[in-house]
Amino acid sequence: MVLRLGFCDYDGAAPTRAAALFRIPNIVPKPTPMTLAPAEAAGLPAEAPAPTGPPPAAGRALLWALLFGNFVIGTGILLPAGMLTELASGLAVTVSSAGSLIAVSGIVVAIGAPLIAALTSQIDRRAILLTALVIYVVAHAASALAPDFEMVLAARVAIGVAAAIFTPQAAATVGALLPPEKRSAGITMIFIGWSLATVGGMPLGGFIAHTFGWRAAFAIVALLSAMAFIAVALTLAKGVRIPSLSSQSWMRVVKSPALMLVLLVTILNGTGQFTFFTYLTPSLEDSLSAGATLLTLVLAWYGVSATLGNVIATRAVGRIGATRAAHISLLAMAGGLAIWGSGASVLPIVLAGATLWGLGTFATNSIQQARLAGLAPELTSASIALNTSAIYLGQALGSGLGGAMINGGWLPELPWIAAALLVLGAAVSMTAARWERRH
């Protein structure tokens, strides 16, 4: 049985799959453009005929280009969290107002991703992806030069639009170009870019902001976006188009109590995590008097734990099922945040909490998507598209809630509030499990 983890499939053969990531699958050669039906999560059904694409060398280069593009997109989305104090100080706003920069981009992606997918399905994927990267270049350059907070906020709206385009459409492009037996490894590979953004991009961006100023961090992301534009332009040929999903698929998801409860779990997961994640920098500065080096260390530690957790999740889902894995992951994160909150002024306790929290971060998103795919395989395209929106909606709600708590003087309590929301998410997850058994 094949399970969908994150934006990819997992069939239980972890060593083989991991090896495939670094061998990078070849793309079946044929130089003509094409139009293909949508996949379960990336644009094509598993039973679709072998697609066409560029020669193998060009195919490998394209996967690396899209991986790099996802790294840049992820770094840009997460960047404000790593330099929130510098942004607030430099733009003469409160920390909670600076946190709204993450909330705004989250709302835009939550609403924009499914709409853009539906409205642009007949547009060449090369044009779509390059347009997204142009927007990213311009928006980050504008942020670097912004004279005030309002300008940065407007730029974040544009950044959200670009992210709503690039990440799902990069997956759709790979799904369209790779034959069924190589799709999983190819899509998995390009999403390593987001993992790298959490492990390295955001912490390094924060370090640059602490050392050289927040404008320098935005400028570097603009430069990286331009490099990603060149890489995609050189490796992706014209002619890939993917028809949109039918309205009936969307309605069947909305009318399913089991699917909607699972999507609510995703929202609560994002809300709980981003209630605290958005404000990690001011929290660490307050509790540990953290400077640039220590902030970078803690953020990188958390990112490594998150990446390791996703690897563990691929095995756990195959052994105990996605539903039980979701319960465990949510409660583990709640426990990690509670540990952090109980000893926020002691570095080893903070790192212990960050480890447990991080192990569930990427894992829960992957598990939730595997859960949706297993619950209604024929609706995977629609349910996972809505799950992506739910992830970003949770980020926006969490950033807003955390900002409101800080305005009320509750900064030290943020880990506990986040933990409580994740416990609520686990309770909803258990309720969803009862509906899943009836499905």
Image: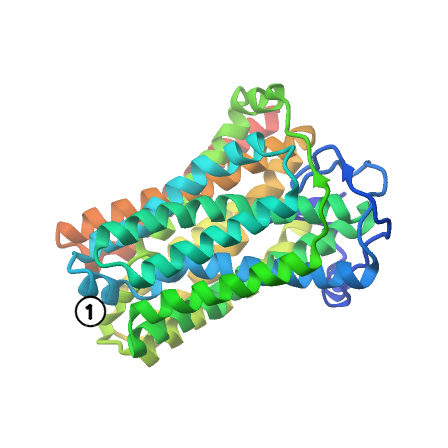
Colouring method of the image: rainbow
Residue at 42% across / 69% down in the picture?
220
Q: Percent from the top left, x then y, of residue 426? A: 44, 42
Instruction: State the residue in front, 242 or 199.
Output: 242
**Left or right: where 251 falls relative to 406:** right
Q: Percent from the top left, x then y, of residue 397? A: 33, 42
For the question of whether residue 420 can be seen, the reply is: no
For the question of whether residue 286 can be seen, the reply is: yes
- The amino acid type found where label 1 is placed reads Asp
Q: Percent from the top left, x then y, of residue 30? A: 86, 49
Residue at 49% across / 68% down in the picture?
199
Q: Percent from the top left, x then y, of residue 6? A: 59, 49
In the image, is residue 430 above or below residue 395?
above
**Left or right: where 32 falls relative to 168:** right
Instruction: Sort mark 1 into few (<14), some (14-19) or many (20+) by Cα contacts within 10 Å.
Output: some
Which image quarter is the N terminus in?
Answer: top right
Q: For the residue labelled by badge 1, is the local secondary structure a helix, a strand or a loop?
A: helix
Count of labels in the image:
1
Q: Which residue is mark 1?
A: 286
Residue at 59% across / 31% down in the picture?
382
